Image (tube, coloured by chain):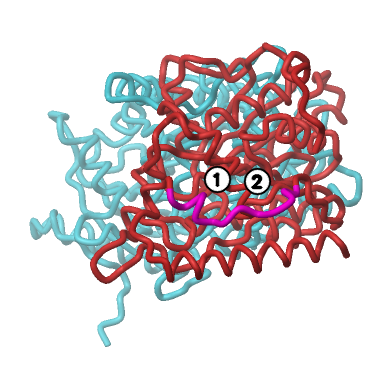
Chain colours: A cyan, B red
Amino acid sequence: MGRRVAFESSCAIAEAAKMANIDVCAAYPITPQTHIVERIAQLIADGELDANYMPVESEHSALSGCLGSSAAGARTFIATAGQGLELMHEVVYVASGMRLPIVMAVCNRALSVPLSIWGDHSDAMAVRDTGWIQIFAENAQQAFDLTLCAFRIAEDPAVLLPTMLHIDGFHLSHVIEPVLLPEQEEVNEFLPRYHHPFVLDPKSPVTMGDFATPALYTEAKVGQDVALRNSLKVILQVFQEFGERFGRDYSPVETYKTEGAEVLLLTMGSFSEVAMEAIDRVRGAGEKVGLVRLRLWRPFPFEQFRQVVNQARLLIVLDRALSFGGPGPVCSEVQAALYHLRQRPQVVGFIGGLGGRDISVEGFQDMVHRGINKAKQGKLGEIEVFDVREQ
Amino acid sequence: METLSIYAPRLVTKRQSFTPGHRACSGCGEALAVKLVMKALGKDVIVVMATGCMEVISTQLPYTAWEVPWIHTLFENAATVATGIESARKALIRKGTPLSKAKIVAIGGDGATFDIGLGAISGAFERGHDFLYICTDNEAYMNTGIQRSSATPFGASTTTQPAGKVSFGQGTWKKNMPAIAVAHDIPYVATACPSYPFDLMNKIKKAVAIEGPTYIHILAVCPTGWRIPADVTIRLGRLAVETGVFPLYEVENGKYTLNYEPPQLRPVIDYLKPQGRFRHLTPELIDKIQQRVSQEYARLKEKVTQ
């Protein structure tokens, strides 16, 4: 059995990268991500991890270095946040298009301007359509566990897609919590050395990153989309195996007290743990409420999501990102997922927790009540930004 | 420079890992340069290429002109991708993965090198990775239609800095990219031109034999962009060297050597006159260019004697 240690979530991810025996890490400093790569650099400096650290001159180069590293067959890790993820934006598409199983930890951060180093999900939503698998963690233990799962999923021969693990900047990245660490042998069994079927090697030359005319571009991109959709099967298998080996179960859509719930609140990331408290209190007051925590954002787990919510009367969705001029990105996704169902809950969307603004337990209680009232008043399509100062 | 003999060409391998049948324009100096580069490099090489003419003409799905491992990702990051490959291979070999030897070579045009990728190249040189960066410089964004770059020479007409009734085209002097490479204190920097094939191939071999980052700057004559007939590519390259516009030199650990020194430089007008991109130049502007070329050449010779 492993041991129980107190770890900052960032360090838990670094520890998972170490136990995954990564070969290369490329990164550029950006708050609130720095603790992850500082820790990795220290592990390398202390001889505890045998890997090459590429201290590159920009985030664009950080992910570009990872492209080369992964294409050469190395287990490759990168971490970033907010503006960093934006600067590497075009490279993000290339990593998935070239089927390179890079694992990236993103300490979610708001986007400028105004400059904010604090957390929200704007950066995660801006890379929604880039073809990466996107997983959200809620606490330090999950951050550790899901980093290991991310490598296993990404490198599966049936997947070969880059994977992003999202942890909320500061709210999770800088929080110290107890973490159960497995033994190295247990990790080695769960995550053996991987071999990409196509690597840059003079013994068997391949051409990577060709250009395609209109005659072939569509086919190339459809192939990529099919791969991402099919990855859900492997994600479920990996979560199941992880649960069997380590005793902690994960699912693309997780629930809290949803049995018989008429009203469901939907959250992503670390705010879910605060929302659980609020659910307890509202339940205590006699309301039949429950919490849905979306763990897997891409590929969107349509079937699992529908099964969880289709019995409910009302679904209240919290988005931690603005889609200027439209509904919150999670809310519009959820509405699209439900639209064709005969039996479906009504949906009320809130936007909140922007730029590190906290939502307290009382805040979530208030959000649930406001959601219920809005549904009663028929104000379903209205987009409300939660807890916004009027003056 | 090595003495040319009629036997020398016979010593060059016939094997082409950058194979014929690609889609380059006729008379393309860049395709010729890449062909010679690949002959000098042999099989044990991984090529990283920036977006540009060479990428587009050689890898249209489902075809490839490459018989060696080759990767293209984006425009500005060939140097960084190369260093990622180098880092990965070093880590894998250290950790026991049996890998065959491979030189890592990044190739980019002047846009990828002088402009959009300059930061990435600087970072890669500074980090000291063991790789060769080759710039194939045809002095404008030819792939997108002859737009000016910071490698475009003074007075050249391009589609984004055209000569017109009140403009003579490019109004700035070409950025000195080899000097920027030298400023990174890397062990080897050289200039080359496919009009001098043995000099070019020797420099490539020399560069990849050196541990650490190396840089070779190749002048690639572009008939399409320079507005010249396709059959004068070699002659134009020679004129660039013989007029001192593009001197062939190398810098080994900071020490400059001039590889070819004509007894007397030809006037730059000999180089400018055949090119459509310079046809609008007045005698005054040609004088101005002559002065600058003479001055730069004298400065280079000073460095050689130091």
| Residue at left offset 26%, top offset 71% | B166
Q: Which residues are magenta?
A: B261-273
> Tag 2, which secondary structure?
strand
Name the residue tied to disc 1: B137
Would residue B121 be found to the left or right of residue B186 on screen?
A: left
Labels 2 & 1 near each other (Cβ < 8 A): yes
Residue toward you, A221 or B172: B172
Q: To which quarter of the image does residue B26 belong?
A: top left
Is residue B138 depicted above or below B200 in this figure? below
Q: Main secondary structure of the magenta part?
A: loop
Q: Is residue B175 visible?
A: yes
Instruction: Pinpoint residue B293: horizontal percent, then vertical percent.
Output: 60, 63
> Tag 1, which secondary structure?
strand
**Around disc 2, counting alpha carbons within 10 Å, would you say few (fewer than 14), some (14 to 19), or many (20 or more)?**
many
Q: Is residue A146 visible?
A: no
Instruction: Pinpoint residue B257: horizontal percent, then vertical percent.
Output: 82, 51
Is residue B104 depicted above or below B249 in this figure? above
Instruction: Pinpoint residue B42: horizontal percent, then vertical percent.
Output: 73, 20
Name the residue tied to disc 2: B217
Give how far apart the Cα atoms at labels 2 and 1 are. 7 Å
Magenta segment includes A340: no
| Disc 1 residue type (three-letter) | Asp
| Residue at left offset 88%, top offset 51% | A45
Q: Quadrant of the C terminus of chain A?
A: bottom left
Would residue A377 be found to the left or right of residue B100 on screen?
A: left
